[in-house]
Image: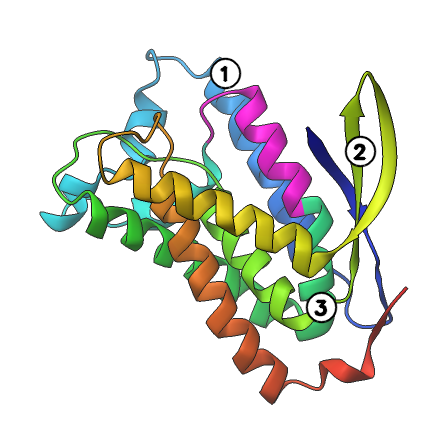
């Protein structure tokens, strides 16, 4: 198994304040979920339910659901990816643009999940849709960056792989799982939220690459 733990960093650029704020916010909200009174009423209210969204109810959950998580491992996996990939994007495009991009990526992800399972009463939660948008933009903007990963083979072996290979493999896994989910094999994961977020990130990455002078920055 492969576990990412870092990447080549952008040299210069903007301070990634929003990325780190989102990290803290996700962790803080998860702590509240653990201690909240009412048996999870807060989590249920602010998770996104496709059937409710299509019925024009609780549209605020398009945003609030991306700051909730279903368990510690769910949170940990998302925060590792947010930590690795988001700061480079924000350093390149600046905090106001990154804030808008991240939120729109999460909304696009929830919309994709809703379209593929429109009448589902099952709540959806997690930052992975928005983070998938970050991954899509990263692939376009920094395909030659190297991702630091651990290979678990009896012991942890550190090495680096090109971002285009790491993220290409990641997306392939989402697509195969997403196609399986159309046949009822989702395993409780909103695969199409990942796919929709990634597609939004790809499109946004091409736009940002053309309209923002990111070539002035270099990874190292």
Q: Earlier in the sequence, mark 1 or mark 3?
A: 1
- Seen in the picture, residue 178 relative to 38 is either above or below; the reply is below
x, y (%) of residue 60? 29, 48
| CA–CA distance in space, label 1 to label 2 | 30 Å
Q: Is residue 86 visible?
A: no
> Which label sits on residue 34?
1
Camera-nearest residue between 170 and 28: 170
Range drawn in magenta: 69-82
Q: Is residue 53 left or right of residue 185?
A: left
Q: Residues within 10 Å of mark 2 (few under 14, many from 20)?
A: some
- Seen in the picture, residue 52 relative to 134 is either above or below; the reply is above
x, y (%) of residue 209? 62, 81
Residue 3 lies in the magenta stretch: no
x, y (%) of residue 11? 88, 69
Q: Residue sitting at 52 percent across and 31 percent down? A: 29
Residue marked by disc 2: 150
Q: Residues within 10 Å of mark 1 (few under 14, many from 20)?
A: few
Residue marked by disc 3: 142
| CA–CA distance in space, label 3 to label 2 | 21 Å
Q: Earlier in the sequence, mark 1 or mark 2?
A: 1
């Amino acid at each position: 198994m492969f576990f990412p733990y870092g990447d080549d960093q952008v040299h210069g650029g903007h301070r990634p304040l929003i990325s780190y704020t989102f990290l803290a916010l996700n962790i803080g909200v998860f702590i509240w979920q653990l201690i909240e009174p009412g048996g999870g009423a807060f989590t249920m209210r602010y998770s996104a339910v496709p059937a409710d969204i299509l019925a024009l109810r609780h549209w605020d959950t398009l945003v609030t659901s991306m700051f909730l998580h279903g368990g510690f491992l769910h949170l940990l996996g998302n925060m590792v990816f947010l930590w690795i990939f988001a700061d480079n994007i924000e350093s390149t495009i600046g905090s106001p643009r990154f804030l808008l991009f991240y939120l729109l990526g999460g909304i696009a992800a929830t919309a994709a999940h809703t379209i593929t399972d429109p009448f589902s009463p099952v709540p959806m939660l997690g930052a992975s849709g928005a983070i998938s948008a970050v991954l899509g933009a990263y692939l376009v903007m920094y395909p030659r960056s190297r991702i630091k990963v651990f290979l678990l083979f009896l012991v942890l072996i550190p090495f680096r792989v090109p971002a285009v290979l790491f993220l290409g493999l990641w997306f392939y896994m989402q697509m195969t799982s997403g196609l399986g989910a159309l046949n009822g094999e989702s395993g409780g994961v909103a695969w199409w939220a990942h796919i929709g977020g990634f597609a939004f990130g790809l499109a946004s990455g091409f736009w940002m690459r053309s309209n923002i002078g990111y070539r002035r920055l270099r990874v190292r």
